[in-house]
Image (cartoon, rainbow, N blue to C red):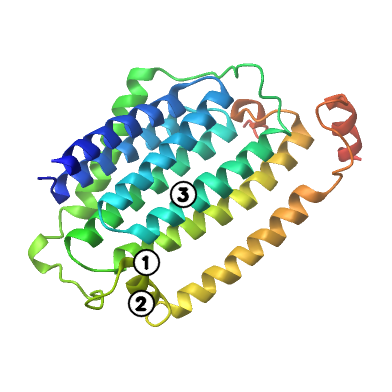
Amino acid sequence: MFEQIAFYLFSILTIGLFLVTVLSNNILYAMTSLASGMVLISGFFFLSGADFLGVVQLIVYVGAVMALYAFGMMFFNVTKTIKENNTSNVLVFVLGVSIALLMVIMFAAPISPEVIFASVQPEPNTTNPEAVGLVLFTKYLVPFEVAAVMLLIAMIGGIILAGKKMDQSLTKTDDENITQKDIK
Amino acid sequence: MIGLNHYLIVAGLLFAIGLIGVIRRRNLLMLFFATEIMLNAANVAFAAISHYYNDLSGQMFAFFIVAIAASEVAIGLGLLILVYKKQGTLDLDDLATMKG
């Protein structure tokens, strides 16, 4: 009963918030609704028993990714509403939904539910974080290490890309000056 | 009772919303938001399948998707800042300089 109420509440709210993200013309509105949608997505994870994944979603997306976006937005002029040369909405909606449907049919239709079997079952009498840890550090150890190296590379790349000429203010100086200097 | 199909339908709807955003948007930052939505829709589907088949592989893949999304945002925002410094705009139509 409560599971159903929670599921429908979460799904309606996430779909509405992500629609605001996609359709809004104000970057601040889009980012706020994206962050609250991420919080509600973690509700789906808690509902489907993936407690650790829900906590990771809260920490990584709502904590780190949204903070990074908010930080990155300080470099751009976000107070004005952005003007976009949008294509017709009906065409975009029809195209988007039909492409998503086509991909589902292409990838999911050949898989019949009978041939799917659980290959990595959780250990009996363990909570979800325990079971995740046991699997992550045994069977998925190499991908875990590769992901760690990838995150380190991404961090170094982010610092090197964004760290150049940090002493110049982008919003206060004229855009023309910086463009001219950068080209030379 | 909430079945697997309910979760998959919601994940498909979220993915379609993200895809609509990718097609419709002309601002690079908004394009990044739309890709985040698509990655999250895939995560919801993975977690639900992992729950209903009592298999932890789905959650593992969701973890790696989260890690990839985090590094994508770090690199992508660095590139966006560089583009904004050079061009002064994030609009895709203004960035299209290779006109044939």
**Residue ID at (60%, 71%):** A149
Tag 2 secondary structure: helix
| Three-letter code, disc 1 | Met
Chain identity of mark 3 = A
Task: Please tell me how crowded label 1 is: few (under 14), some (14-19), or many (20+) other residues with Cα within 10 Å.
Answer: many
Q: Quarter-wise, where is residue A183 in the image?
A: top right
Tag 1 secondary structure: helix
Residue A8: horizontal and vertical position, in percent? 22, 35
Lateral position of residue A123 relative to residue A162, left or right: left
| Three-letter code, disc 2 | Val
- Tell which residue pokes out farthest to the bottom in this image: A138
**Residue ID at (67%, 34%):** A73
- Separation of residues labelled 2 and 3 (CA atoms): 21 Å
Q: Which mark is residue B60?
A: 1
**What residue does disc 2 label?**
A135
Mark 3–mark 1 contact, CB under 8 Å?
no
Task: Please tell me how crowded label 3 is: few (under 14), some (14-19), or many (20+) other residues with Cα within 10 Å.
Answer: some
